[in-house]
Amino acid sequence: MGKNFGTTLVPEGAQRLQVPRVAQLVEVQVVDDEWIAFVSEGELADLPDEFYLRELRHYDGDSTIQEIADLIEEYGQLCLDDFAEWSGDVFGNWEQRSIAIEKRIEYKKQYNVDMLVPDSLLHLWEGRPHLDYLRFLRDGWIVAAATGDLADYAQLFVDVPNGQPIESTVRHWLHALNAGLRVSHARIDHPLVQEEGATLFGASCIQLYNHIQEGARYKVCMNESCGRIFVRQQGRAAKDQRKSEGVKYCSSKCARAQAQRELRRRRSVAAQAPDDVILEAQREESRVMAMVALAKARREQGVPSLGATLRVKRLELALDDRSVRRRAGVDAPILIAIEADDFERYEGQHVHMERWLTALAELYGMDSKEVVARYRADRLLELSR
Ligand SMILES: [Zn+2]
């Protein structure tokens, strides 16, 4: 466990920032499989709460042009075309920015447009790095908020071919968020002049900043079929009353779905004969004891832990956190917790552990039953202490 950066990142007395509204777009079209053309409508709209955490969850540097087009059509302009919000450090450097500029010059020639940099266009190479940056900022902070150390996120990249040293990952994280914030806050407006809309990138950085400022705790939705990371429950409650304390579900919809599932389960248990219930409980107890003994024996023999074993497998297969999320549905903060044998890092995480471990084992070509059995044994051993 590292130093607690959580309390020192934002200066004491710093205020929450107003999340700016985002310019809406219409007539969004994919052109030549690499451009998104649109008309800026001028209308401004609020971003949904926790947008960077929820809606952007599945976006990253591998997003397709169509995915990005759908995103901006629904929520608004993604980023500034001059990359002013993007510090350009770790994921692609200046190279990516110059490719995007070249592409704009090509576009100008091909379509014979006057402006050097038409602002009603977005290139794939502009959209992807911004989305990847938001992923990097989000995942980095979720981990830091749980462990107290921003450097813990960098564990993902240690020992990875071409991986970044920990200090530079932390430095890039800070540069990236500061660059995003620099553009987006402290502004003046006049009622006679159309207020300029923020971008999804800038507004997302502010949402994240506010979570850092308030010391928000991230949780995992305890609806068995959800597992999304969130801070406050969304749904029925009035906007300013959205709760974070004592909340288990990301939305009122998830709360209802899980309540119904549990009700069905209780009914089916109640329908069993009492003798069957007792027999099942006895079987379960002896199984539990055997598993705890097995977990103890493994530890005494110095067998590498489950998290360490999974980590070695991932590195052997050269899978980064994006591939793991896309192919096994396990988000980076969860993956980092699993690899650190921290199976209860986030509130609600344990509900999904078996599902996630099964998916990881399948992705890594391991025996998923064995992986889940090891997890159960380790967890029981921890709980029995
Ligand atoms: Zn949920």
Image: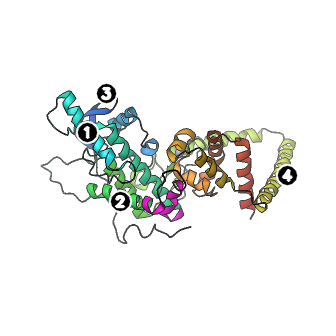
Q: CA distance from mark 4 to mark 1?
A: 68 Å
Mark 4 Cα-neighbour bin, 10 Å: few <14, some 14–19, many ≥20: few
Tell me if the residue at label 4 has its CB under 8 Å from ligand 1.
Answer: no
The nearer-to-camera label among 4 and 1 is 1
Q: CA distance from mark 3 to mark 1?
A: 16 Å
Callout 1 amino acid: Glu
Q: What is the spatial separation of the Cα atoms under label 4 and label 2, in whole angstroms?
A: 54 Å
Q: Earlier in the sequence, mark 2 or mark 1?
A: 1
Q: Quadrant of residue 63?
A: top left
Query: Which mark lies nearer to you, 2 or 1?
Result: 1
Q: Which residue is mark 4?
A: 286
Looking at the rendered structure, the secondary structure element under dot 4 is: helix
Q: Which residue is mark 1?
A: 102
* Observer-nearest of 134 and 185: 134
Which residue is located at x 65 percent, y 39 percent? 362
Indicate left or right for 144 with 44 as reference.
right
Q: x%, y% of residue 263?
A: 66, 42
Foreground disc of the pair 3, 1: 1
Q: What span is colored magenta in the figure?
A: 147-168
Q: Pick out the residue farthest to the front.
A: 161
Q: Callout 2, which amino acid? A: His
Going from N to C along the chain, the mark reached first, 4 or 1, is 1
- Specify which label sits upstream in the sequence, 3 or 4: 3
Task: Assign a secondary structure to mark 1.
Answer: helix
Q: Are marks 4 and 1 in contact (CB under 8 Å)?
A: no
Give the answer, above or below, for where 4 lies relative to 210.
Answer: below
Which residue position is annotated with label 2?
Answer: 175
Q: Position of residue 104 (x, y in %)?
A: 24, 37
Disc 3 marks which residue? Answer: 32
> In the picture, which quadrant includes the C terminus?
bottom right
